Amino acid sequence: PICALSRRYHVTWNKKPLGETRLAARVRPYHALLTTLADPITRKVLQAAPLLQCVANFAVGYNNIDLQAAKEKGIWVTNTPEVLTEATADIAWALLLSCARRIPEGERMVRAGKFKGWHPLMLLGQDLTGKTLGIYGFGRIGQSVARRGRGWNMKVLYHQRHPVSRSVEQGLQARYASFQQLLQRSDFISVNAPLTTQTRHRFGTREFLKMKRSAIFINTARGAIHDEKALAHALQKGIIHSAGLDVYEFEPRIHPQLTRLENCTLLPHLGSATVETRDQMALLAAENIHLVLSGRKPKTPVFIP
Ligand code: GLV
């Protein structure tokens, strides 16, 4: 995005996130900000930027931005939907396969020199084929996860506030379930919802207790949608089978108990991390900024100010 924009604009950048205080101290001269999910674009930051017209988030999620404050100031907020859908669904699937087939455990075992030959009971996992996949949050990414489930002949349930249209349900052969049904009936649960006040800590001790003991919990959305301490407890006590996480509540910090559990696969927020996807995200964010700064409507606004 820097190359694309620097032909027309004066661009500066930081290699690492600055944090709220330093951001607020530096934003004054800027007309646009290209931000990552690690940049807290709070009311304080927005108030310190009198010239600001656009915050282009280099992510589909925008829980790092105070939308209300942006709206009040008439600042456009944009994100990068669509272009990262398939890459993120792939990471959810990679985590599901990792947990079900205990792939990271096997890899650690081989590297530690502990593979002493084939054994009929070594590292037994679970079949995926024909199982019930439960998706929490059935937007673009959730639906893309569902589409992959069909390749494994899975039954797909989903939950979010409102059901999707019949034609989308039929196309994906997915059925709407209440949250309780989703917890109780799913063999695998994939979280693909945005982080909002409604979804924060939606998965805690009570929810893990309702799941099957064989359940696998995958979160590639935002870490704060589950309660990390409750998840660590559920994994340690065998309340659920395993978990695959790409996201954490306080990134890059991870609840220390999670890092000690063999039945937890941990990735460093790789959902959209492919060359093709990151290129497209960059171009989209740059295009959004250019459109706003030339007085036009951005391509992917989060709201219309
Ligand atoms: C990544 O987490 C994103 O929201 O794009």
Image: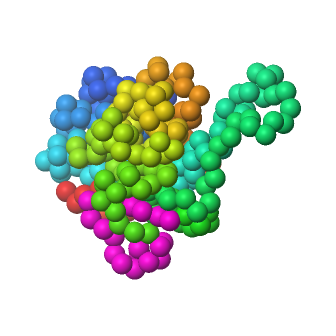
Front residue of 119 and 247: 119
Q: Is residue 275 left or right of residue 258?
A: right
Residue 248 placement (x, y as % from top left)? 42, 33
User: Magenta stretch containing residue 169, yes or no?
Assistant: yes
Residue at the extreme left? 72
Residue 60 placement (x, y as % from top left)? 40, 51
Numbered disc total: 0
Depicted 144 relative to depicted 32: above or below: below
Depicted 3 relative to depicted 21: above or below: below
Q: In this rendering, does residue 184 appear at all? A: yes
Front residue of 256 and 20: 256
Residue 198 placement (x, y as % from top left)? 23, 47
Query: Which residue is drawn at the image coordinates 79% and 23% (left, top)?
Result: 114
Query: Which residue is drawn at the image coordinates 13% and 47% (left, top)?
Result: 72
Depicted 99 relative to depicted 171: above or below: above
Q: In this rendering, does residue 140 appear at all? A: no
Query: Which residue is drawn at the image coordinates 24% and 35% (left, top)?
Result: 42
Quadrant of image for the C terminus? bottom left
Q: Which residues are magenta?
A: 155-173
Query: Which residue is drawn at the image coordinates 49% and 51% (left, top)?
Result: 188
Q: Is residue 109 left or right of residue 171?
A: right
User: Magenta stretch containing residue 284, yes or no?
Assistant: no
Residue at the extreme right? 117
Front residue of 74 and 196: 196
Q: Is residue 289 left or right of residue 220?
A: left
Residue 86 quadrant: bottom right
Residue 203 placement (x, y as % from top left)? 34, 41
Front residue of 233 and 275: 233
Residue at the extreme front? 120
Q: Is the image coloured rainbow, by chain, by secondary structure, or in one colour?
A: rainbow
